[in-house]
Image (cartoon, rainbow, N blue to C red):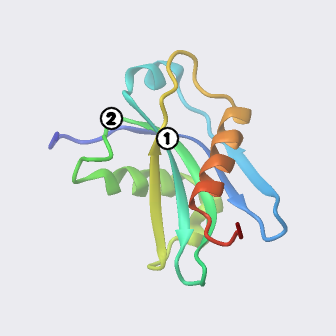
């Protein structure tokens, strides 16, 4: 889509712990920047080195890039650089599963992030039985 540089504002991130709990963090960002950026994503980290794959973390960003842009991976790299707690999951077996979030108006709060992260965790997890 656009060949110009991208702007990405990391907002929240979390890790899904083995015991079923979530450890999460918020990142400071400028509200004016948030309002100026068009795309909100929640991106899950899937560890494909285990069978079945495990969703090990997630993060939320507001960005100028659309997921169909060839350089959307740049958004992921920018965000991951700011999230020290996710660095342990930066390896070849990790895939990124972006979901565009249709929230307008006020930025999502921490509780919104956690709700969305759990929805995506449930959607992408393959460890459950039905």
Q: Position of residue 59 (x, y in %)?
A: 57, 49
Q: Which residue occupies the foreground of this view, 23 or 129? A: 129
Q: Position of residue 21 (x, y in %)?
A: 82, 58
Residue at image position (57%, 67%) is 87
Tell me the residue at 62%/40% (across/down): 27
Q: Position of residue 110 (x, y in %)?
A: 71, 35
Q: In the picture, which quadrant includes the C terminus?
A: bottom right
- Left/right placement of residue 85 relative to residue 77 reads right
Q: Residue at x 50, y 57 (%)?
A: 80
Q: Secondary structure at mark 1?
A: strand
**Judging from the image, what secondary structure is the residue with disc 2 in?**
loop
The residue pinned by badge 1 equals 61
Q: How many marks?
A: 2
* Disc 1 to disc 2: CB gap under 8 Å: no
| Residue found at the very far top of the displayed protein | 105
Q: Residue at x 46, y 57 (%)?
A: 97
Q: Which mark is residue 22?
A: none
In the rendered image, the vertical position of residue 64 relative to residue 42, given as above or below: above
72, 27: nearer the viewer = 72
Q: Which residue is mark 2?
A: 64
- Left or right: 13 as drawn, with respect to 67: right
Observer-nearest of 130 and 34: 130
For the residue carrying disc 1, how many other residues have a C-alpha within 10 Å: few (<14), some (14-19), or many (20+)? many
In the rendered image, the residue lying farthest to the front is 130
Disc 1/disc 2 C-alpha distance (Å): 10 Å
Classify residue 47 by image quadrant. Answer: bottom right
Residue 9 image offset from top left, x and y in percent: 47, 37
Q: Quadrant of the N terminus?
A: top left
Mark 2, other Cα within 10 Å: few <14 / some 14–19 / many ≥20 = some
Q: Quadrant of residue 128?
A: bottom right
Q: In the displayed structure, would residue 21 be above or below residue 103?
A: below
């Amino acid at each position: 889509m656009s060949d110009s540089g991208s702007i990405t504002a990391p907002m929240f991130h979390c890790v899904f712990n083995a015991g079923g709990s979530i450890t999460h963090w918020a990142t400071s960002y400028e509200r004016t920047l948030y309002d100026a950026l068009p795309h909100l994503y929640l991106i899950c980290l899937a560890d494909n080195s285990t069978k079945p794959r495990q969703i090990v973390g997630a993060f939320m960003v507001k960005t100028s890039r659309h997921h169909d842009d060839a350089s959307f991976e740049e958004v992921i790299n920018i965000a991951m650089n700011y999230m020290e707690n996710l660095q342990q999951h930066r390896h070849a077996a990790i895939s990124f599963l972006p979901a565009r979030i249709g929230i307008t108006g006020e930025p999502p709060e921490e509780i919104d992030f956690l709700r969305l992260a759990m929805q995506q965790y449930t959607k992408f997890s393959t460890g459950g039985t039905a």
